[in-house]
Amino acid sequence: MIQEFCTFVKYMKTKIAENIKFYRNQMNLTQSELAALLCGKKSLISNYENGYSTPDIYTLCKLADIFGITLDGLVEWEKE
């Protein structure tokens, strides 16, 4: 059970990282430009996209708003 949960968390972190990069590129934003919209540094976005860190819930909501998508869409959450 614990191993399944850890696998799920790793999967979610990877999907979030991939989606941040995907939607940033869809909007033709650089990492620096997206960071400025979040009042952060370019390294913050790089860390998100490379999976070194994961945005907190406030930042996830702000990213979804910037990208014009739902939070569910950003994290690709589907209730089974």
Image: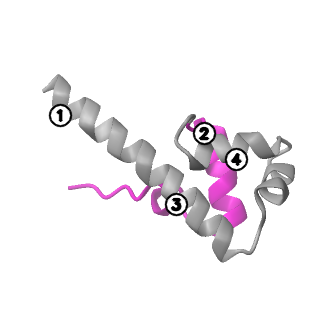
Q: Nearer the viewer, residue 1 or 7?
A: 7
The image quadrant where one finds the N terminus is top left
Element under label 3?
A: helix
Name the amino acid type tagged 3: Asn
* Magenta-span inclusion, residue 2: no
The answer, for residue 35, to whether it is visible in the render is yes
Q: Are marks 4 and 2 in contact (CB under 8 Å)?
A: no
Q: Are marks 1 and 2 in contact (CB under 8 Å)?
A: no
Boundaries of the magenta span: 54-80
Name the amino acid type tagged 2: Pro
User: Which dot, 1 or 4, sits closer to the camera?
Assistant: 4
Q: Nearer the viewer, residue 15 or 65?
A: 15
Q: Earlier in the sequence, mark 4 or mark 3?
A: 3
Name the amino acid type tagged 4: Ile
Q: Label 4, label 3: how many angstroms apart (C-alpha)?
A: 12 Å
Element under label 4?
A: helix
Q: Earlier in the sequence, mark 3 or mark 1?
A: 1
Residue 4's mark? Answer: 1
